Image (cartoon, grey):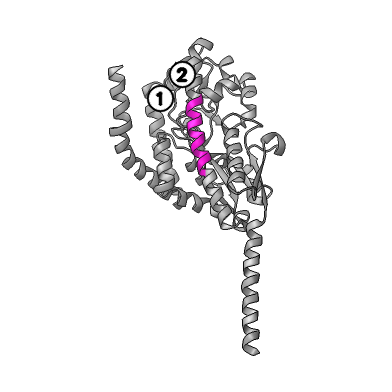
Amino acid sequence: MKIRSVLSAAVLAVATTLAAGQALAQEKFTLRMAETWGPNFPIFGDTTKRFAENVEKMSNGRLQVRIDSANKHKAPLGVFDMVKAGQYDLGHSASYYWKGKVPETLYFTSMPFGMNAMEQYAWFYHGGGMELMQEVYEPHNMLSFPGGNTGVQMGGWFRKEIKSLDDLKGLKMRIPGFAGEVFAEVGVNPTNIAPGELYTALERNTIDAVEWVGPALDLRLGFQQIADYYYTGWHEPATELQFLVNKKVWEKLPQDLQEIMRIAMRTASYDMLVHSQHENAKAWANIKEEYPNVQIKQFPQDIFQAMYDANKKLLKEAAAGSEIAAKIIESQQNYLEQSRAYTDISERAYLNTMAEVE
């Protein structure tokens, strides 16, 4: 009888465990996401919608994501704080927006004169970038994942042509991240403004110049109606957005739903990169016909050199002031050196060859 009782108790325990596991597998979860962008914002907003759709499909409806755009939560640059505090479960934004809170976050968006999109994704997924990013976000009760790349961003819209370093002195410009610090070193007054306020700020002379993304998104915001000079990029060669996840929320999800989230985020990131390429190419093809006033410019070589030197100086200072910043900077620089050597004999060599025969 005693043995039978023990066996019965064991069977009951196993059955209870299996039942609990089955119940958990059938439990449904709804997560709330805050995004920095306005409702139906092209490309960026498409990325979050694809993510939510894929999560629901792959989980067979067990996991749903509801998206609140900036017009709903009223804090486009407050996503970090809202996800950290648990006000929202997820966020979609850009890591360099948080440099005032946690300076080391800015390295995970894009760095001036740094890696292109392919190189940067390789660094994230195979070169230690994800681990370093988690080391930065871990103390803030969050996980961060790559959230979509724009590719090389344009250098910005200017009301007047920039011919020398003197033309930059005192210029008020919307430009975030490390590039803003570099521009400050050469005399610009950088500021960060939420996306929905950019056109008005430029129109009302609150700023003299604005950097946003590229042709597909810039032309939609109408900057070409105010500024004639459109400069090519140097500052964000691979701008990566991010998915922020509240760590406590993540840990409550079953492992299969966590994996579905990982796959959906990675897929959405890839989709955004190719979507950006497609839309920018379309917009660029028509820019001369539709907007003949727009003049495509490159910064003069002396300005590039001054910004490059300022970038090196600032990186050295950042590495000296923060152990984790030093680790990230060293990792990125080492990976760029290794990866660029191959990029030079593959992508660059191909493009140079094509330029010679066309």
Is residue 18 highlighted in magenta?
A: no
Tell me where residue 290 appears, x and y as whole percent.
53, 11
- The amino acid beneath tag 1 is Ile
In the shown orientation, is residue 219 left or right of residue 39? Answer: left
Quadrant in which the N terminus appears: bottom right
Question: To which residue does mark 2 refer?
Answer: 162
Location of residue 91 with respect to 286 vertically, above or below? below
Give the magenta-colored segment's residue range.
Answer: 266-279
On the image, which quarter does residue 237 sit in? top left
**How crowded is the residue under tag 1: few (<14 C-alpha within 10 Å), some, or many (20+)?**
some
Q: CA distance from mark 1 to mark 2?
A: 9 Å
Q: Which mark is residue 98?
A: none
In the shown orientation, is residue 252 left or right of residue 165? Answer: right
- The amino acid beneath tag 2 is Ile
Q: How many marks?
A: 2
Tell me where residue 173 appears, x and y as whole percent.
55, 26
